[in-house]
Image: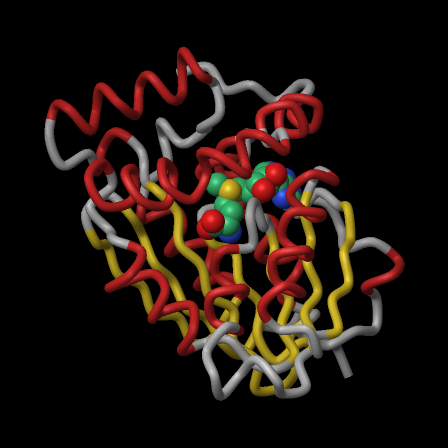
Amino acid sequence: MADLGADKNAAYVTAYSPSFLTHFYDKYVLGFNMSFMWGCPVDTILLPFFSENFSRNHLDIGVATGYFPATALSRPFRRDSKQHLTLVDLGPNPLRAASARVLSVATATEVRCIEADATEPPPESLRGHRFDSISMFNLFHCVPGGKAKLRALAEYKNLLSEDGVLTGCTVLGHAHAANWLTSLYLRWYNRRLKVFHNWDDRKEDIQEALESEFEEVETWVIGTTMLFRAKRPRQPLVDV
Ligand SMILES: C[S@@+](CC[C@H](N)C(=O)[O-])C[C@H]1O[C@@H](n2cnc3c(N)ncnc32)[C@H](O)[C@@H]1O
């Protein structure tokens, strides 16, 4: 299926409008779709997975409403503690929505917002920074560009601290659809709505990209969703 590379930034900034984020995103995208279409519920699978890998010095890439960091930070043992959170997204609307939500539940959090494309080298303002955890939740299925979009792993792995962990999840393409309804829904999202770009996304390709960038990789497929956790970024061999 043809993938749309052009105007991807403009399309995302338009799709993630303040009203879509406020009124639909959590209930429809995270509630209905994750549970009933992609077979990977947020409350029992994705939120525990996020929270388990969420450090006090965290970088979240592709943020939408900030549901995951805000919910993790709203726990009584988290909300008053010292927390640094950097948010990266293509558009200003998700950054505004996510930072406001985080600060509404965890006022002591130091939040930094950066507008950037995750498939490009990290902006100057992030160079030299190290994070104990990085998340890419529900990011890749939204990004056009076939396997090339997975270079976000290579671009951001060097921002991990020595024992840092990168986690994420993404809805896989038609080869992994659980049934005809999922397949139809995927087609609709890719061809009609054009907000997904994952028709050809395969677990094997994502696994291979992860293994070529990290020494330690774990993956799981739940429903049509792939979860991943990676540690110890591989470094280029240096001749001595
Ligand atoms: C489906 S939402 C996922 C949000 C959140 N992580 C979650 O799981 O609820 C995808 C987010 O990624 C952002 N995004 C899409 N392509 C991106 C890119 N190339 N670089 C950075 N952010 C991107 C969108 O603007 C949107 O906020």
Residue 20 appears at what percent x and percent y?
53, 30
Q: Is residue 215 left or right of residue 108?
A: left
Instruction: Find residue 222 and report its image quarter.
Output: bottom left
Residue 58 horizontal/vertical position (percent): 62, 72
Q: Residue furthest right?
A: 124
Task: Identify the residue shown where x is 25% and y is 29%.
Answer: 174
- Indicate which quadrant contains ligand 1: top right
Coloring basis for residues:
secondary structure
> Image point 75% across, 73% down: which residue?
110
Total number of numbered discs in the rendering: 0
Is residue 139 visible in the rendered structure shown here? no
Residue 100 % position (x, y): 68, 55
**Vertical side of 45 occupied by 202: above or below:** above
Q: Residue at x 69, y 53 (%)?
A: 88
Q: Measuring 62% from the left and 73% from the top, which residue is drawn there?
A: 106
Residue closer to the observer: 47 or 173: 47
Q: Is residue 80 left or right of residue 73?
A: right
| Direction from residue 169 to residue 131 in the image, left or right | right
Specify whether residue 12 is in view: yes
Horizontal and vertical percent position of residue 192: 41, 11
- Residue 164 sits in quarter: bottom right
- Residue at the far left: name it: 179
Which part of the image, by quadrant, shows the C terminus?
bottom right
Q: Is residue 152 above or below residue 68?
A: above
Apparent side of residue 180 relative to residue 23 in the rendered image (left or right): left
Q: Quadrant of the N terminus?
A: top left
